[in-house]
Image (tube, rainbow, N blue to C red):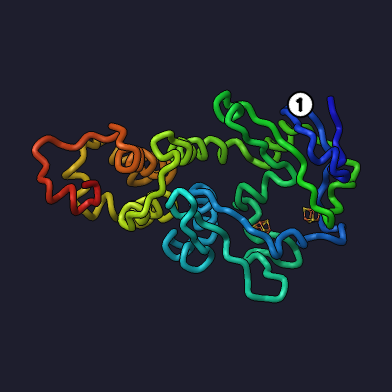
Amino acid sequence: MEIKTGKSKSQALTVLRAKDSFRFACHSGLACFTRCCRGITIFLTPYDILRMKNALGITSTSFLKEYTVSFIGDSGLPVVFLKMGDDADESCPFVTSQGCTIYPHRPWSCRIYPLQPESTKITEKTDREYYSIMDIPFCLGLAENKTSTVADWKESQGIAIYREMEIFFKKIMMSPHLSGKKITNKKIQDMFYMACYDLDRFRRFVFESKFLKLFEVNLKTTEKIKCDEVELYKFAMRWLEYGLLGQHELKVKPGVMKRQKQELGIE
Ligand code: SF4
Ligand code: SF4
């Protein structure tokens, strides 16, 4: 079993597997407490947004407006980041001197720290996970004596559900169908943004447009996506697989008018 302190560059760059250990403990007694919640870039996944907006008791539309910024990435698809405050430290909107106010629902990247996934084409293909320790000079937690294995750390931080949800999103982002392409169609960009990040708007899209008249969606699925947001998210990813990747994840009802398809932005 390997133990890393994360304090030296050579160690920080060592790749860790599930059974390897590293030194780290974060607590309010450290002089650096909450310093890492300021002046940082936090990429948000669809599941991060689902959890955070529910923790705040607001809609995804309001959450996106108030707490995020988005950019068009290299692929032409929108990416979403947490909007830092306009104070001198650029503080996260959820940090206080006592810590994170949404701690049980904090985003994936706040949970996994100080681990950093090391992703290569081989690890993606084989679904194996490797990590390194992030080398953050001001983080005193990296010099604490407590050790954890990578596997135990992930378990203690509730990473499993985030990884499970990420698989649906990654299936789209890593699709060979999109490889080397740049999407410039604004309607497609908006469809992607809605399905991935604005789940409350996607729900209205499904239930308040002609969507259910156009697609064959059985009653069981309809009921599930009506009351279970995780199921709605998975359904949104199926919709993207259909609309973006051209995969037959959803079936159009026979005899559907071309105009209806156009209204739903799939033609
Ligand atoms: S120990 Fe590291 S993670 Fe914890 S508050 Fe300090 S800088 Fe942040
Ligand atoms: S979400 Fe919480 S843990 Fe993450 S940066 Fe903000 S305050 Fe810190």
Quadrant of res 38: bottom right
Above or below 13: residue 94: below
From the viewer's perspective, is 208 left or right of 113?
left
Residue beneath label 1, please?
19
Above or below 30: residue 47: above
Q: Position of residue 255 (x, y in %)?
A: 8, 38
Q: Nearer the viewer, residue 188 or 143?
A: 188
Q: Position of residue 231 (x, y in %)?
A: 40, 40
Quadrant of res 151: top right
Above or below 126: residue 195: below
Q: Nearer the viewer, residue 24 or 133?
A: 133
**Which residue is painted at 63% across and 39% down in the image?**
159
Q: Position of residue 161 (x, y in %)?
A: 56, 38
Residue type of the residue flagged with mark 1? Lys
Residue at the farthest bottom position: 87
**Which residue is painted at 33% across and 52% down in the image?**
188
The verdict on label 1 being within 8 Å of ligand 1 is no
From the viewer's perspective, is 264 left or right of 233?
left
Q: Position of residue 43 (x, y in %)?
A: 58, 53
**Which residue is painted at 49% across and 51% down in the image?**
74
Which quadrant contains ligand 1? bottom right
* Crowdedness near tag 1: few (<14), some (14–19) or many (≥20) residues, C-alpha within 10 Å: few
Q: Nearer the viewer, residue 186 or 209?
A: 186
Which type of secondary structure does the marked residue at label 1 adopt? loop
Q: Quadrant of the N terminus?
A: top right
Quadrant of res 175: top left
Above or below 147: residue 266: below
**Which residue is painted at 84% across and 50% down in the image?**
141
